[in-house]
Image: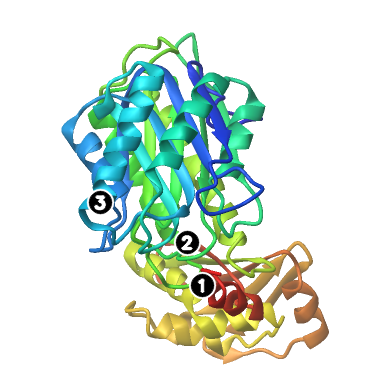
Amino acid sequence: MELIKGGVTSAKGFKAACTAAGIKYKGRTDMALVVSDVPATCAGTFTSNVVKAACVKWDMDIVNSGRKMSAVVVNSGIANACTGREGYEACEKTAKAAAEALNVDKDGVAVASTGVIGMQLPVDKLENGVKAMAPLLSESIEAGTDASKAIMTTDTVNKETAVSFTIGDKKVTLGGMSKGSGMIHPNMCTMLGFLCTDANVSKNVLQEILSDVVKDTFNMITVDGDTSTNDTLLIMANGLAENEEIIGKGEAYDKLYEAVYSVCEYLAKRMAGDGEGATKLFEAAVVNAKSKNDAKLMARSVVGSNLSKAAIYGNDANFGRFLCAMGYSGAQFDEADVELYFKSANGTLKVFDHGVPLSFDEDEATKILSADAVTVYIDMNEGDAKATAWGCDLTYDYVKINADYRS
């Protein structure tokens, strides 16, 4: 597998465009359109929040029905959540406008929204935005990058990546983009994300791979403990690589799985590190745990703890906060078995060994913790299971951003 430059337009037969529709933001693009040249097999995972945005319900219907997907229309600024029947009609009207502009089936047009909850979308601006984007569609890398920027809200950087690999004698490509900076918490998967591949794969296999990959990527990140109403991850596979259809387990399945995992892990880590107000990526790696579930519980608890996140922000080697978070995670373990380290590009420092605190150089600890990416590495010494979770530090700016979000 090779990492290549690009995003949603990297795979054969995918185009993208964006426009400034004036939905909420001024002076920047706020709508994106991703289109497949041919109707694509699709799969998706969605928010576990009981309160689901209208666009989530619209897209779930497409994925669950087994219909092919031809396009995705995304807007930033307004989430179209808690908007009742009018909100759902906005989805339908947007999909209809795209279908007419692209000459595709309305029931195969997905829609996604991100932004303020509880506001109605200006449908006329969405319809005009779709009409403006259709003639601008391009397969260029730049078009995909511009689309990834148009879907940002409080994100400070766009998030995209792509990989290529071979199945038989056919080159297959998979690219993706995502947005997410706040309301980030596990349980599918707090984000908007869109993956595009030219692989020829059955719907059942595509859904199986996506659902499994999400468990160890997007479901292992947290910024603030809030699971959004709009979380959507969609993948389109248009088959234009012309590989033999992947219908079950085997070498081709494994290669596609690895590609989906690689793209999703990269995007997930980029989202965690770009948390609202964040200054660094905060990773918790739990190894040698009794079970995978225990490892996940502890890793997510450590990166989700406000006290842990504040310590990371302050470069404070207060390891007791991380042990405390492990202790209330729901996992059962003996603290006398635990070893805990701080790791970064600036070095490695062991601070806790089999139930006993170690003496360490505070200046060295501060140096390690002041890196752009910091890992709390925890060896449980009780089994062979492992898990990694990602988050970010908690800063003063997080409160500032969210106190002023609607203004």
Where does label 3 land, which residue? 86
Disc 2 marks which amino acid? Ile
**Label 1 sits on residue:** 303
The quarter of the picture where residue 275 lies is bottom right
Quote the CA–CA distance across marks 3 and 2. Answer: 33 Å
| Element on which disc 3 rests | helix
Alpha carbon distance from label 1 to label 3: 38 Å
Circle 3 Cα neighbour tier, 10 Å, few/some/many (<14 / 14–19 / ≥20): some
Residue 230 visible in the shown view: yes
Q: Is residue 211 left or right of residue 308?
A: left
Q: Is residue 154 left or right of residue 27?
A: left
Which amino acid is tagged 3?
A: Glu
| Residue designated by label 2 | 221
Mark found first going from the N terminus, 1 or 2:
2
Would you identify the image quadrant in which residue 245 lies?
top left
Q: Amino acid at mark 1?
A: Val
Residue 157 lies, with reference to residue 205, above or below; the image says: below
x and y, in percent, of residue 285 in the image: 53, 65
Q: Are marks 3 and 2 in contact (CB under 8 Å)?
A: no
